[in-house]
Amino acid sequence: MLPLISTVPQTLSPSLSFHFHPFPSSSTPSLSLHIPLKNTLRIRSIDAAQPYDYESHLRTQHLKSQSLKIAILGFGNFGQFLSKTLSRQGHTLLAYSRSDYTDIAKNLGVTFYSNPHDLFESHPEVVILCTSILSTEKVLQTLPFQRLKRSTLIVDVLSVKEFAKNILLKYLPVEFDILCTHPMFGPESGKISWVGLPFVYDKVRIGNEEDRITRVERFLDVFAKEGCRMVEMTCAEHDRYAAGSQFVTHTMGRVLERFGLDSSPINTKGYDTLLDLVENTGGDSFELYYGLFMYNKNAMEQLERLDMAFEAIKKELFGKLHHVYRKQLFGNADEGAEERPKVQKLLHNGAPPSDDVVKQETS
Ligand code: NAP
C-alpha cells in the first residue's frame, strides 16, 4: 500500500489510470496517475487488488526449496506428535507403521503406507525412526533399505542414544547418513510450544558432500525454527545425563501415580507440580519407560540411588523420633550424645562429576 493522502473534493471525479507491471524489478507494482485537474490530488489509501502476489510467490518458492520429503516409521504417539509440526512447516510427509493409521494420517496431512516397500520406493530424503526402544532393532532388520536412495539420511528419536547409535551402525548400509537425536519433550510437555525445550543430537555419520551437510542442517532447522535449545553431544554423554534426569523424572512420576495423588481444595504450588509430573509422565507408554531402564546402562545405578535416598530420609526421620522417645523415657540424662546426622548427597546426580568435585573428593 502507498501511504498517500487525498484532498480531492467529493464532487470531482478525476480520471485516474493505473499501470501495473506484472513482473517489476522491485516487489512493489509501479503505479502512475494522470489527473487533468488543477487541484492537487492526495490519495489516502489504495486498495486495488494486486494482479500478481509477487512476495507470496517468492515465499512459497523459498519454502519449497527448504522443504524435505520425510518418512516417519512408527506412527504412534510420538510419530504423530512430530508430524504435526513437520506438516505445519510445509514438509512432505509419508508414514508407515505396524498398525493402520490411514485416517489419522489423512487428518494430519500425511500419506500413510501399509507396506514399507511402497513407502521406500517413493524415495524420501529423510527417514525418521519413531518406533519403540524395544522394537527398533527388530524393525531395522526387516526394513527394505535397498529400495531407498543410497544417500538417504536416517534419523532416530529414541530416548536412549548409545543403543540407538550401535544398532543403526550395525544394520544400516554404510552409504546412509546417520543422525541420532532426542527431542527432550513429547506430546504433553511440548503441547503448546517447543520454545526453550532441549533438542539433543549427535551427527554420527554424515558424508562430506555439500548436499548431505546441507540436508542435515535443514533437518535440524526444523527444531531450531520452533525455538528448541539445540544441544550437540555424544550419545554416551546424553545417556549419562538422561539417566540422572529423565529416568528419575519418569520413575518419580510412576511412583506417585501408583501412590495415587488426588487434587484437594488447598493444593500448594509444590503439590500442583507433583500432579503435573504424574500427568506428564502418565501419557507415555510403559514400554517407553521400560526401554529407558533396559537400554540405558546408567539407569540401574540411578534407581539404586533413589532407593538409598528414600531409605536415608526414612532413617533420618525415624532417628529423630527415636531421640524424642528416649528423651521422654530417660529425661536429659544423655543430652548431647546424639548429633544430627549429616545429610549426604549419594552420588553425582547422574551427570559426569566436574573437575572441582573430583579434586575435592580425591584430595
Ligand atoms: P512407544 O511405545 O515407545 O512406541 C510406539 C511406537 O512403536 C508405535 O509407532 C508402534 O507402532 C511402534 N512399535 C511398538 N512395537 C512394535 C513392534 N513390535 N513392531 C513394530 N513397531 C512397533 O511410544 P512413543 O511415545 O510413540 O515413542 C516412540 C519413540 O519416540 C520411542 O523410541 C521413544 O523413546 C521416542 N520418544 C518419545 C517421546 C515421548 O514423549 N513420547 C519423546 C522423545 C522420544 P504401532 O503404533 O503401529 O503399533
Image (spheres, grey):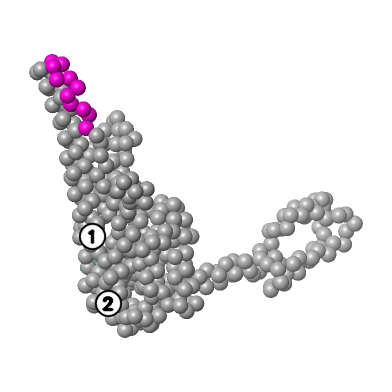
Q: Residue at x 20, y 36 (%)?
A: 313
| Residue 333 is inside the magenta segment | yes
Quadrant in the rendering for residue 266: top left
Q: Residue furthest right?
A: 38
From the viewer's perspective, is residue 51 above or below residue 150?
above
Residue farthest left in this picture: 329
Q: Is mark 2 within 8 Å of ligand 1?
A: no
Give the residue pinned by disc 1. Answer: 297
Local SS, label 2: helix
Q: Nearer the viewer, residue 43 or 178?
A: 178
Q: Nearer the viewer, residue 329 or 33?
A: 329
Residue 52 coordinates in the image, percent (x, y): 64, 70
Q: Position of residue 289 (x, y in %)?
A: 23, 56
Q: Which residue is mark 2?
A: 171
Would residue 231 be found to the left or right of residue 253 on screen?
Answer: right
Please tell me whether residue 257 belongs to the stretch shown in magenta: no
Q: Nearer the viewer, mark 2 or mark 1?
A: 1
Which three-letter amino acid code belongs to the residue tagged 1? Lys
> What's the magenta region?
331-341
Residue 181 seen from this side:
no
State which tag comes first along the sequence, 2 or 1.
2
Q: CA distance from mark 2 to mark 1?
A: 21 Å
Decide: is 345 above or below 335.
below
In the image, residue 318 lies at what x, y percent? Answer: 15, 31
- State the image quarter where residue 295 is shown: bottom left
Q: Is residue 266 visible?
A: yes
Quarter in which the N terminus is drawn: bottom right
